Image (cartoon, grey):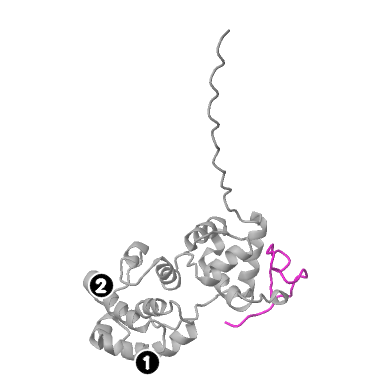
């Protein structure tokens, strides 16, 4: 009598991770951004600046701070130093005096001086127009680089801040576990003709309507399209103009 063949050990299959996808069809995504474009044809960033350098500094200072708070501090700073050369002449202590009301001001003053040194040393005092060169500067991450590229150089970048990260996940528009994931998914789904201003539209929508604690769905121009489980209403809202 033949001996039974040994049983093969059961192989546990690894659970398949479903790719996070947008809950919206291409037509719905197009309509969302078409409405944003009608509401704000030329959206503007709320950080005050006079050139590429002051914009770069303002964005660096805005980490863990409000735009209003940064603007209040930088008016005096930029009046004294609106170029890397002038910032170096002002020095770390001089810069720090202007930004004491901003969180982490000591480290930020060091970064502002360090990036000013790098700009003078490596770029003849000019702000570079590539993400790689910007991210090589002290204190400049991907989000900061994307903001500068979008606002000053007009490049169709997506700078994912707290508001955009929240909206991407809350609305199931571009869900992701990290800002980089949300950025990649937004860039992949937003129609090219809307990419130039999409960053601003989403930030302003998150800041004034789709707020963190209580979304104001009755004022939302995409309420009838929204698939968020947190949606507070089911009735489409009229087109409204939000604060610029």
In the picture, which quadrant includes the C terminus? bottom right
Identify the residue shown where x is 55% and y is 31%. Answer: 10
Q: Is residue 212 above or below residue 32?
A: below
- Does the magenta segment cover residue 222? yes
The answer to whether any part of residue 79 appears in the image is no
Image-based side of 69 in relation to 166, left or right? left
Q: Main secondary structure of the magenta part?
A: loop
Identify the residue shown where x is 33% and y is 84%. Answer: 82
For residue 126, the mark is none
Given residues 125 and 226, the one toward you in this image is 226
Identify the residue shown where x is 34% and y is 62%. Answer: 132
For residue 118, the mark is 2
Crowd tier of the residue under label 1, counting other residues whose Cα lies within 10 Å: few below 14, some 14–19, many 20 or above: some
In the structure shown, which secondary structural element does the residue marked by tag 1 occupy? helix
Q: Quadrant of residue 198?
A: bottom right
- Does the magenta segment cover residue 56? no
Residue found at the very far left of the displayed protein: 121
How many numbered circles does the render carry? 2
Crowd tier of the residue under label 2, counting other residues whose Cα lies within 10 Å: few below 14, some 14–19, many 20 or above: some
Q: In which quarter of the image is residue 111?
A: bottom left
What segment carries the magenta color?
Answer: 220-244
Residue 73 x %, y %: 41, 89
Q: In this view, does 65 lie above or below 194?
A: below
In the picture, which quadrant includes the N terminus? top right
Residue 97 x %, y %: 33, 91
């Amino acid at each position: 009598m033949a001996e039974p063949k040994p049983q093969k050990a059961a192989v546990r299959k690894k659970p398949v991770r479903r790719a996070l996808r947008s809950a919206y069809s291409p037509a719905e995504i197009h309509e969302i951004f078409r409405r944003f474009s009608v509401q704000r044809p030329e959206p503007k960033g709320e950080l005050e600046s006079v050139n590429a350098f002051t914009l770069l500094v303002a964005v660096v200072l805005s980490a863990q701070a409000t735009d209003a708070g940064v603007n209040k501090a930088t008016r005096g700073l930029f009046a004294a130093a609106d170029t890397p050369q002038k910032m170096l002449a002002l020095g770390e202590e001089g810069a720090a005096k202007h930004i004491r009301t901003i969180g982490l001001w000591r480290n930020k003053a060091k970064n502002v001086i360090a990036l000013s040194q790098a700009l003078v040393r490596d770029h003849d005092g000019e702000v570079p127009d590539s993400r790689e060169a910007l991210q090589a500067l002290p204190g400049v991450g991907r989000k900061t680089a994307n903001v500068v590229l979008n606002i000053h150089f007009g490049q169709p970048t997506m700078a994912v801040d707290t508001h955009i990260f929240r909206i991407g996940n809350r609305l199931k528009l571009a869900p992701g576990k990290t800002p980089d994931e949300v950025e990649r998914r937004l860039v992949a789904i937003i129609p090219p003709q809307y990419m130039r201003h999409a960053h601003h539209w989403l930030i302003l929508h998150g800041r004034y309507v789709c707020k963190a604690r209580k979304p104001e769905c009755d004022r939302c121009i995409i309420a009838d399209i929204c698939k968020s489980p947190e949606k507070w209403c089911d009735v489409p809202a009229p087109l409204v103009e939000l604060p610029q």
